Image: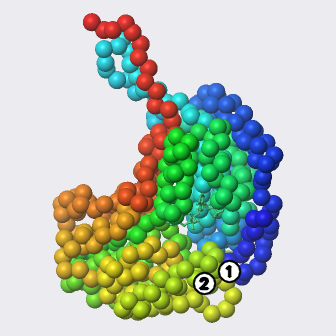
Amino acid sequence: MIVSINPATGEELARFEDHAGDAIAQRLALATQAQRTWAQTPLADRLPLLRRVAAQLRADKHTLARTITLEMGKPLAEAVGEVEKCAWNFDFYAEAAPGFLADQVVASSASDSRIVYDPIGLVLAVMPWNYPLWQVMRAAAPVLAGGNGLVLKHASNVPQCALAIEQVFVRAGLPEGLVTTLLVGAAAVPSLIADRRIAAVTFTGSTPAGRSIAAAAGQALKKQVLELGGSDPFIVLADADVQAAATVAVKARFQNTGQSCIAAKRFIVEAPVADRFVEAFCDITRQLVVGDPLAAGSTQGSMARTSLRDELHAQVQASIHEGAKLLLGGGPVAGPGAFYQPTVFDHVTPGMTVAREETFGPAAAILRVRDAAEAVRIANDTPFGLGAALWTADLDRAARLVHAIEAGAVFVNGMVASDPRLPFGGSKESGYGRELGMLGLHEFMNAKTVWTGPVRT
Ligand code: NAP
């Protein structure tokens, strides 16, 4: 049984029978048929349908946003923004796909040699709950643009979002089954990956789950893209605009109630500006309004499950025990729901729990360092390598430092964010492969070499 619970109240919203046996077989058969038809549909005819998905998302944005908020607790305004971003992604690929999928002519000894891009089939998407629409739509738009189909196994705490996503595509007029939701738990994933109708898998979620999926995909010899956890550094050098850095830093940490893979989690600040940064960071954090995510004034909602809140609280308590200086928050908000106080630690050292582990919730760790070299060393002192932010007024120095930072993306004087135009993905234990941009579209295409003779003389 898959149960939808409002984490802000603890109230059960709905429950669904898991898909099993025949239901899975029927859905995969329909998806396979729909993908074959879609793959044979000329690109020029697929693109208007992608635009219709964007239009459908915009038309449904308030209902979709409400479903997101009810199931995982983010403020409604953030949920509306999430749906709008999904629509942008579909418009972007409708515009950019012809260029990304154009044949690439390569000079060789042939009369003509080129790379052509063919779809590979059905892509299984195993997705997390933190951006229940965006995570799926970020994968779906390039997959569909390329002529592939998508089978969605969404996180078990967002089944209503999973079903609503399927409906968006049906209502937009895409072939029935081209995007298919399977309501199944994690235990069903290895057999889905092994199923001959599944060509590849894209996974976004925790690093431990990523290891299991990589093992199953490796066993089945299927292509995989893994977007995993992160503990992103946010480096503030002594010449940075400290006030601007602190303002962005608070957003980068507490947006989505801190439940983002690319949230800044470790604030690494050069000693001469550390006091000023800490003061500004705490002042801005105090202005967050924690409360009912459906209420207009709330800027921080509930965490997505009480178990996640309890895990965060255990990390916070461990860090206090290890000697981190607690400046703000430090515990759950009293009353019903999985609310947690915005929490700030100063004088964190790299071995402490809040610096060593991924904190998936509203808890910030500030580490003070001597100089830029120590900042980069500490930034890299983690198994993760997803994103990083670097704040400095010296752009020449930034251009050198970005190469020393082990991450899939470095944002200079900004906060790490996904953008349909730019590739997105990790290094080290944050995963491999890329989503979004041209690279994201090419991940699930067969880049086929076509050589036509005779040999040129
Ligand atoms: P999670 O526990 O790994 O779950 C994500 C998805 O994987 C869910 O659909 C889950 O299904 C499934 N799953 C869990 N264990 C599995 C296993 N052993 N085999 C196959 N599937 C499995 O992650 P989460 O708690 O939902 O999300 C938080 C994590 O995701 C954080 O670590 C975060 O950093 C990461 N994340 C990364 C990115 C990125 O782009 N790099 C983006 C967002 C989140 P059930 O729900 O049925 O268990």
Query: In the rendered image, is residue 228 in sight?
Result: yes
> Distance from label 2 to label 1 (Cα)?
7 Å
Q: Amino acid at mark 1?
A: Ala
Residue 66: tell me if it is visible: no
- Residue 242: x and y, percent? 29, 79
Question: How many C-alpha atoms fall within 10 Å of the one at disc 2: few (<14), some, or many (≥20)?
Answer: many
Q: Quadrant of residue 320?
A: bottom left
Q: Three-letter amino acid code at disc 2?
A: Phe
On the rendered structure, is 104 left or right of 124? Answer: left
**Which residue lies at the image location 58% right of the left edge and 69% below the top edge?**
78
Number of marks in the rendered image: 2
Which image quarter holds the C terminus? top left
Sequence-earlier tag: 2 or 1? 1
Instruction: Label 1: state its secondary structure.
Output: loop
- Residue 306, position in %: x, y? 64, 80
Write down the residue under mark 1: 8
The residue beneath circle 2 is: 339
Which residue is found at the position 71% from the left and 66% from the top? Answer: 67
Q: Quadrant of residue 380?
A: bottom left
Q: Quadrant of ligand 1?
A: bottom right
Going 57% across and 57% down the picture, which residue do you hit?
135
Q: Residue placed at 50% from the left, 32% from the top?
A: 446
* Quadrant location of the N terminus in the rendered image: bottom right
Could you classify mark 1 by the number of other residues whose Cα lies within 10 Å: few (under 14), some (14-19), or many (20 or more)? many
Q: Are marks 2 and 1 in contact (CB under 8 Å)?
A: yes
- SS of the residue under disc 2: loop
| Location of residue 370 with respect to 30 vertically, above or below | below
**Relative image position of residue 245 (x, y in whole percent):** 33, 75
Q: Which numbered dot is residue 295?
A: none
Residue 33 locus on image (x, y percent): 72, 33
Residue 79 vertical placement versus 149 (above, below):
below
For residue 104, what is the image quadrant? top left
